[in-house]
Image (cartoon, rainbow, N blue to C red):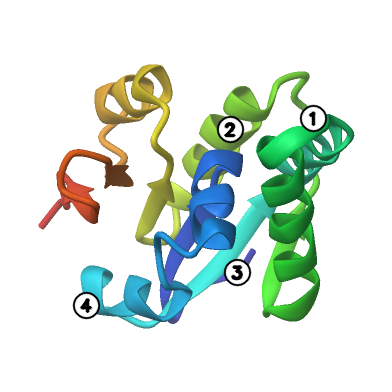
């Protein structure tokens, strides 16, 4: 990991799917964060997307689009020894937090609550407003 020059943005599968749907322009994240950032995705999130992509319907289609997107952008895939994607995200955020500014992009309420209790800010998609919002950015 080393020292960080930019903010670390960890992406959850639901946010990747929102980006794949076109609801969140990837280019808008830097404006919201008001920072240069490095994208990081835990390998468990990619596994989760692969699993969703096997399903039929729109959900599977957008998971496949999210996987294609990951192949076309500059993103670090982090291997974390966790059984669930949410646990991998928390573990990774805690590792980065000791040396870097870190934000997790997820619309999972339970995961956001866990992260908030650990003083880790989150970005989430607010469906009612159709916008991405930053929840709790530390000073």
Mark sitting on residue 81? 1
Name which of mark 3 and mark 2 comes first in the sequence. 3
Q: What residue occupies the far right of the structure in this picture?
A: 54
Where is residue 68 drawn, in percent x and y? 79, 66
Q: Residues within 10 Å of mark 4 (few under 14, many from 20)?
A: few
Q: Do residues under tags 1 and 2 come within 8 Å of each other at their CB atoms? A: yes
Distance of label 3 from label 4 (alpha carbons): 23 Å
Distance of label 4 from label 2 (alpha carbons): 25 Å
- 90 displayed left or right of 133: right
Q: Do residues under tags 1 and 4 come within 8 Å of each other at their CB atoms? A: no
- 133 displayed left or right of 113: left
Q: Nearer the viewer, mark 4 or mark 2?
A: 4
Residue topped by disc 3: 2
Residue topped by disc 4: 34
Name which of mark 1 and mark 2 comes first in the sequence. 1
Q: From the viewer's perspective, is residue 129 above or below residue 73? A: above
Residue topped by disc 2: 91
Name which of mark 1 and mark 4 comes first in the sequence. 4
Name which of mark 3 and mark 4 comes first in the sequence. 3
Q: Nearer the viewer, mark 3 or mark 2?
A: 2
- 24 displayed left or right of 65: left
Name which of mark 1 and mark 3 comes first in the sequence. 3
């Amino acid at each position: 990991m080393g020292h960080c020059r930019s903010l670390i943005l960890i992406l959850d599968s639901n946010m990747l799917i929102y980006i794949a749907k076109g609801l969140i322009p990837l280019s808008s994240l830097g404006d919201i964060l008001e920072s240069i950032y490095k994208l990081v995705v835990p390998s468990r999130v990619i596994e989760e997307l692969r699993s969703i992509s096997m399903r039929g319907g729109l959900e599977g289609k957008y998971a496949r689009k999210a996987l294609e997107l990951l192949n076309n952008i500059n993103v670090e895939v982090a291997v974390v020894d966790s059984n669930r994607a949410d646990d991998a995200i928390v573990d990774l955020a805690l590792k980065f937090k000791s040396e870097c500014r870190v934000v997790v992009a997820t619309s999972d309420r339970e995961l956001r609550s866990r992260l908030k209790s650990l003083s880790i800010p989150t970005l989430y998609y607010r469906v009612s407003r159709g916008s991405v919002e930053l929840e709790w950015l530390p000073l």
